[in-house]
Amino acid sequence: MPRNRLVHADASLQVQVPNRSALSRATNKATQIVSSLGGYAQSVQYQSARQGSGDAFLALRVPVGRAETAIARLGSLGRLVSQQISTQDLQQQLTHQTNQIGSLRRAIAVYEQALQSGSLSATQRVEIQIKLANAQHSLKLVRRARSGTVASGATADISLTLTTRNGGAIGGGHHKSGRFDRLLGSAGSFLALEGIIVLYALIVVGPLLVLGGLAWWILRERRRREERLLASA
């Protein structure tokens, strides 16, 4: 694992044990291993059949700095059938989010200073207030996203399958969803931001549109009244 960059690691291991007694012991040992390394088991699913076969599916999470140790220990619980490890570099994403936070802070300072200047027209003040509110909400969302990025880079997700079966891939259990969940989180943040902007625009601009429509209606009625007076004369 890279030591000088923020990364998220996903690992998938399949380990064969001789019987159901060994399966039970290995399952308990796996949770003890990750606990001793500062991690924890997110879920444990245990399945056994009357014929003596059985499977256990464990979703484990450990500090990324101890992922290699955890993988090595978990792989030694029996005969290692398969192992897959993937990493996602989060350093560029973290840097981008940090830069976004800095830019938003500077923009907020400019907007606040403009509102305090007293030199804005009513229309300009409304525009600046909208921009300020959008920037403040964006800052909150980016800060939350950055915290999620840091948390993701601090841990590694390990999918461990223990089985008494001879070879072959075992179906069922949990699935790797780390990257998909992070993409959904990013999409949700974007949609939340869009919703906030639209809602704020409706709240602030909506009354202005109503007033504009009312003024147009008054002018139209006045014009019609004048036309009727001229016609009657």
Image (tube, rainbow, N blue to C red):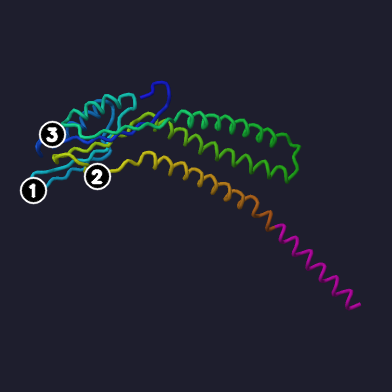
Residue under label 3, please give it: 25
Q: Label 1, label 3: how many angstroms apart (C-alpha)?
A: 18 Å
Q: What amino acid is found at the position of numbered circle 1 in the picture?
A: Arg
Query: How many residues crowd mark 3 within 10 Å: few (<14), some (14–19), many (20+)?
Result: few
Give the magenta-colored segment's residue range.
Answer: 211-233
Q: Distance from label 2 to label 3 (Cα)?
A: 19 Å
- Does residue 52 belong to the magenta stretch? no
**Residue 136, percent across and down?**
57, 38
Instruction: Label 2: state its secondary structure.
Output: loop
Image-based side of 198 in relation to 225, left or right: left
Q: Position of residue 178 (x, y in %)?
A: 36, 39
Of residue 79 and residue 183, the one placed in the foreground of this image is 79
Element on which disc 3 rests: helix
Element marked by disc 1? loop
Near mark 1 (Cα within 10 A), the count class, few <14, some 14-19 or many ≥20, is few
Q: Is residue 1 above or below residue 218?
A: above
Residue positioned most to the right: 233
Question: At label 3, which amino acid type do we have?
Answer: Arg
Which image quadrant is residue 35 in?
top left
Q: Position of residue 93 (x, y in %)?
A: 48, 32
Q: Which residue is mark 1?
A: 50
- Which residue is painted at 27% across and 43% down in the image? 174
Check disc 2 and report the residue beneath it: 173
